[in-house]
Image (tube, grey):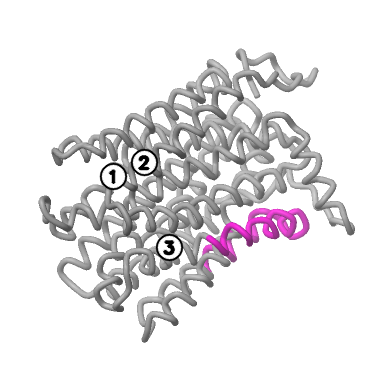
Amino acid sequence: MAAHARGSAGYRRLTLAMLFAGFSTFSLLYSVQPLLPIFAQRFGVNAEGASLAVSLATGPLAIGILFAGALSDRWGRRPMMVAAMFLAGLFTLATAVAPDWTTLLALRFATGVALAGVPAVAMAYVAEEVDAGSVGSAMGLYIAGSAIGGMAGRLGVSLIADVADWRWAIGIVGLAGLAMAEAFRRLAPESRGFTRRTHKRGSVWRATATLFADRALPLLYAEAFLLMGVFVTIYNYAGFRLLAPPYSLGHAAVGAIFLLYLLGSASSAWFGGLSGRLGRRLVFWTPVVLLIVGILLTATAPLWSVILGIAAVTVGFFGAHSIASAWVGRRARENRGQGAALYLFFYYAGSSVLGSAGGVAWTRAGWPGVTVFCLMLGVAALVIALLLRRVAPLPIPVETPVKPIGSD
């Protein structure tokens, strides 16, 4: 059957379902981020230790994604996403009543494992079910949902924690995650383009070798690692900085910073559309430069300048991620599931590894240390973005209409 084209009823249902999937994933995964200072105080840990509440979810998620992509080739994209979303919501509800720090971290670990079934499969699901000309916009909307979910989860938790206990805040996020899971189950169309594949011994390794032989994909995987490391580090430790003098903001005020995710939501859709018209190779470096400018602005003293810097980092990150994720789906071709899994492995590994490493920079050198750390990552990402401009586009299949320059 034909793939869903933009404007069709199936396309509208699928993109709305993907908005819910993105919302659920990021809200459940990162809702604890604004609570890190509270965890440090309540459980008697430092900033690096508190960051484990994030890293111990993103770390297993990164590893789980490698297996989820292959398993979805056998079980189907949609069923795996539905099961993953329900399980993650239930684990988050359990986190709200965790009796101690060790149990809380164990439940965050389980949440990360469960969520592995969403992001890796989402990219392959969209690439298979949406026609080639609409993939960029569809992925942009999925990432927009991620941005909205990340904002709503963090902001909601901050506001509730300011007037009630942090446990109530996490519990409400868990209930919202279950509601999103049910919405996705009802809306997501049954697969049309999925072909069940059973991986024989060594087939995953052969697929991986094929993907790494591509000139663009290893560079895109490196970009995922670096850019996510910058993004998570900035948001992980901005709360510690803004709660302390000379700003001395309250938890609700710090939580309001996450409203900047609305800019990320808009930028992901805008950059996704722009790259579809002008070519990913020609556009990709632009949001990376914007992210670097944002890092520099956060190093200044005025509060308005710090907030403007975080806004620029947010817009740059989501714009770059929107382009890169759609690019991976195009370049991976028949190995889309594994290609998406590898991209997201590096993406969430960057969150886990570099997010915690940023805590070391904060503990040893404060925000100047965080700035230098993030600048190093940002400059490396820009170098790779410029290298990607040299990568030749894939040949356009005969049956596919001619698309703009750099259509890969």
Q: Position of residue 223 (x, y in %)?
A: 55, 37
Q: Position of residue 211 (x, y in %)?
A: 75, 39
Q: Position of residue 46 (x, y in %)?
A: 32, 69
Q: CA distance from mark 3 to mark 2?
A: 22 Å
Residue located beneath label 2 in the image = 372
Label placed on residue 304: none
Which circle, 3 or 1, is nearer the viewer?
1
Residue located beneath label 3 in the image = 54
**66 to the left or right of 334:** left
| Helix, strand or loop for the magenta stretch, by majority | helix
Q: Check disc 3 and give the amino acid type.
A: Val
Asked whether 361 or 119 is in front, the reply is 361
In percent of the image, x 80 and y 39: which residue is there? 210
* SS type, badge 3: helix
Per the image, is 68 magenta? yes
Q: Are marks 3 and 2 in contact (CB under 8 Å)?
A: no
Structural crowding at the residue carrying mark 1, measured as other residues with C-alpha within 10 Å and reported as few (<14), some (14–19) or many (≥20): some
